[in-house]
Every structure is written in C-alpha cells, then in structure tokens.
Image (cartoon, helix red, strand yellow):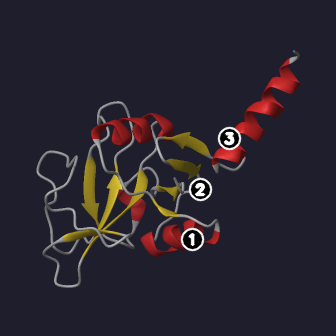
Amino acid sequence: MNISKLKCSSRLFLTRLGCEEDWVLHGNSCYHVNSTPTIEWSDARTMCQSDGGDLAVIRSQDENKFIFRLLKNESAWLGLKRNSDGKAFYWVDGTPLEGHFSAWGSGEPNSRNEKCVRLYGGPNSLGKWNDMRCNSNYSKMKRAPVVLCQKRLMR
C-alpha cells in the first residue's frame, strides 16, 4: 500500500469516528488548535462554536497532558470561566470545576477580576492553568492565547 492511500484511509477512519480533517482524536473527543492568537475569550469561543464545537473542557490528567502536547508550547484559552459573582469556576458545558480535576499553576487562581482561564504553553509550565482577564492588553505577554476547540463524540 502506498503512503497516499494510507493517509486517505486514515483520514476516512477518523472521519467515520467523528473527527474531521485537521482535528485530532483523543478519548471521546476531537480537538483542533487554531494557532491565531486571540485576545478575547469570547472571540475564541465563537470561533469554536462556528466549527461545531466549543472551547476545551478538561476532565482528567491524561486529557490535560494530551492537550499540552498538542499545543506545542502555545498558551490556549480553556472553556473554563468564573461565574458572575467571581467565586466559582464553571466549564462551558455548565459543569462546576469544584470537586473535579484541575491543574492550577502555583498561586492560581489568584484574582476574582481574572474570570477566564488559559493553559500555559512552554517547556516550564507543564500544562498548568492560569486565571486571567477575558479581554486584556497582551503587551506584557509574548502572544495572546491561541484557540483550542473540542467536539465530543457521540458514543
């Protein structure tokens, strides 16, 4: 079998499982990284929703490690946000963070004014999370977070 047939049959196999081209299968979800730095969390979410998904919801250490490797040293918005009173975090699917897996960086979360969450990129962060403003001036950062989308597969 030649390589082009193998690539084509692999793509067809993933499509049958529910992942489209340029999306990566892990567990019961497909993931896509849009590497365009995106200043606003809401813009990142809209991008994912326009592709039929949403910002990523992380349920386990295994999933967090997979996503960290997928990002290749980029920082990315997660589908995690504080509620309106600033006390608790909820995933975009409505699940509260409390009582579930989390991977906060040292000293995080650290401000009720920082309502959105990103996964740190880079070799020293080890996939840790950081609360931050949902729309901010990124002049102090090298880049704004990229967009990490997820589609859950029906099983």
The mark that comes first in sequence, 2 or 1, is 2
Side (left or right) of 97 relative to 56: left
The residue positioned 21% from the left and 49% from the top of the image is 101
Instruction: Judge the density around disc 1: few (<14), some (14-19), many (≥20) Cα neighbours within 10 Å.
Output: some
> Is disc 1 in contact with disc 3, using a CB cutoff of under 8 Å?
no
Name the residue carrying label 2. 36
Tell which tag, 3 or 2, sits nearer the viewer: 3
Name the residue carrying label 3. 14
What secondary structure is marked by label 3?
helix
Could you tell me residue 94's position as x and y percent?
32, 73
Q: Amino acid at mark 2?
A: Thr
C-alpha distance separating marks 2 and 1: 16 Å
Q: Which mark is residue 49?
A: 1
Q: Amino acid at mark 3?
A: Leu
Q: Residue furthest top?
A: 1
Front in this rendered view, residue 99 or 133: 99
The residue positioned 21% from the left and 62% from the top of the image is 97
Q: Amino acid at mark 1?
A: Gln
What secondary structure is marked by label 1?
helix
Query: In the rendered image, which quarter is residue 13 located in?
Result: top right
Q: Where 25 sits versus 45, above or below?
A: above
The mark that comes first in sequence, 3 or 2, is 3
